[in-house]
Structures are given as C-alpha cells and as structure tokens.
Amino acid sequence: MSFEIKKAELAKNGYAILEHFYNNKEVTALINCINHSINNDNRRFTKTKDVIAIRQLINDIPELKKILFNNPIKILLSTLFKTNYFLTKAIYFDKPKESNWFVAFHQDLSISVDKKVTLKNYKNWTYKKEQYGVQPPIAILEDTVTLRIHLDDTNQYNGALKVIPKSHLNGILRNESKDWNTSNQYVCEVNKGGLMIMKPLTIHASNKTTNFKQRRVIHLEFNTKQLEPSLNWLEYSKI
C-alpha cells in the first residue's frame, strides 16, 4: 500500500482508509489486553449500556504499545509527519451490540492537558474524568492526525463514522448544523484490522447501532507541536 497516496487523500478529503493494517493475531492480542484491563478496577474506565470507554489507554495498558506501534504504523506516521511526532491522546471505545448511542455531527476541538492555566488562545476549558480539556490555537488542531484502529467490521449499521469530505479545509466552524452542509456525507466503512486516518477538523458523526453487532475502536491522536511552556500534553508519549 502507498502511504504517500493516503497522505494525499488525507490532505484533500480530511480522511483516508487503510484496510488490513493489522492481522487477526494482532487484533486478538489487542482485544485480550483491553479485556484484561476492563476486568480490573480502573478510574478512567467508563461502562454503561450504551458505551464502554477507557481514557488514557496507553498509560493504563502500556503493554498495548508493542502491539500497536509495529513497523507499518511507524512508517505511516513518519510519512504523515516527516518530523518528530508524538502521541497526545489514546482512547478505547466499544459500542456494544445493544447500543442506542449516537453522536451528532461535530469537529474534535479539545486536547487533553495536565492542568488549567490562563493563556491567550486557549479556551473552552473542561474537566471530565479527572482530566482537563481545552480548545487550543487552530495551528495545533491543524497539525493533529487521528488514527482509528478497528477491532471489528464496522459499517453504517453499527456506528461507522460519517464524515463530510473536505470540511477540514474550512477551519473551526460554528457548532450549529445550519452552518454545515451535510448533503455530501460519506460513511467510512472499515473492516476488522483496518485503520482510518482523520483530521480533527473534519466534520463527523456516528449513528446508532441497528444490526446488533459490536464496534470496538482504538482512537489515537498525534502531533508535532509543543504547547505553551506552562502547559503540557497530558498523554505525551514518544513512539
């Protein structure tokens, strides 16, 4: 597969899909690591009838690193960034078979940081699950690349992401659907072991599950930019 072609697709459309990125053995190893953690007490672990989530995934399950960051993904990241990149966020999402959870169209505008400080161009602070989030300057969001690793076959019936192609080229948009043209939305169906690359400013959404099939995804964010000297990425990790 040509990572340069996928890099061009990402720049043009705001997303790209790479099928068969992880083999069945690797996917099984990832699932086993995560399930072991779920069975233990974890303060960043959320479980409801509609969603299971683990925040700071790599911090909580460091053994995932040697499976996730194999040679292909390192080559991919080096192709995408061409410079020193690092991990800034890692989350595990599980949309259970019976889930009626959906997410409306939005952009990913928040990063996770180590504390709250007053800084110019850092706004919309939040504090959830014992961690701070903030909307940084747009240059940081534009530098971010998200990788979504699919542990199950995912399609329009079990919550595959819907995206608005090229919407990332318009910067930060008002969070009102009337400002967004969603007529050209595209459903990003990805098979088990596949990988979706996305820019956080790409408008995206996720439907309810209707086919009673599970959808498990590992969500990773990468960047090359450091924050203001008084602020640090919460999950900063060299790969």
Image (cartoon, helix red, strand yellow):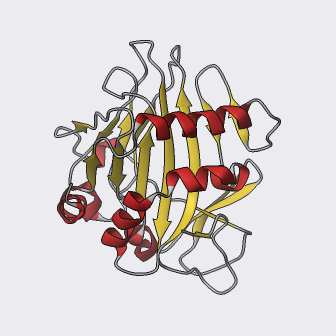
**Left or right of residue 10: residue 25:** right
Specify whether residue 71 is in view. yes
| Viewer-closest of 44 and 19 | 19
Residue 183 location (% of width, % of height): 18, 37
Residue furthest bottom as drawn = 229
Location of residue 1 with respect to 41 vertically, above or below: below
**Left or right of residue 98: residue 15:** left
Residue furthest right as drawn = 41
Specify whether residue 93 is in view. no
Asked which quadrant contains residue 231, the reply is bottom right
Instruction: Write the residue at 39% across / 23% down.
Output: 158
Residue 141 location (% of width, % of height): 43, 67
Instruction: Write the residue at 45% across / 54% down.
Output: 108
Residue furthest front as drawn = 25
Asked which quadrant contains residue 157, the reply is top left
Residue 42 location (% of width, % of height): 79, 40
Residue 54 location (% of width, % of height): 65, 42
Instruction: Write the residue at 28% across / 52% down.
Output: 15
Image mark count:
0
| Viewer-closest of 102 and 47 | 47
Question: In which quadrant is the C terminus drawn?
Answer: bottom right
Question: In which quadrant is the N terminus drawn?
Answer: bottom left
Instruction: Write the residue at 38% across / 55% down.
Output: 174
| Viewer-closest of 58 and 189 | 58
**Left or right of residue 47: residue 180:** left
Location of residue 34 with respect to 207 vertically, above or below: below
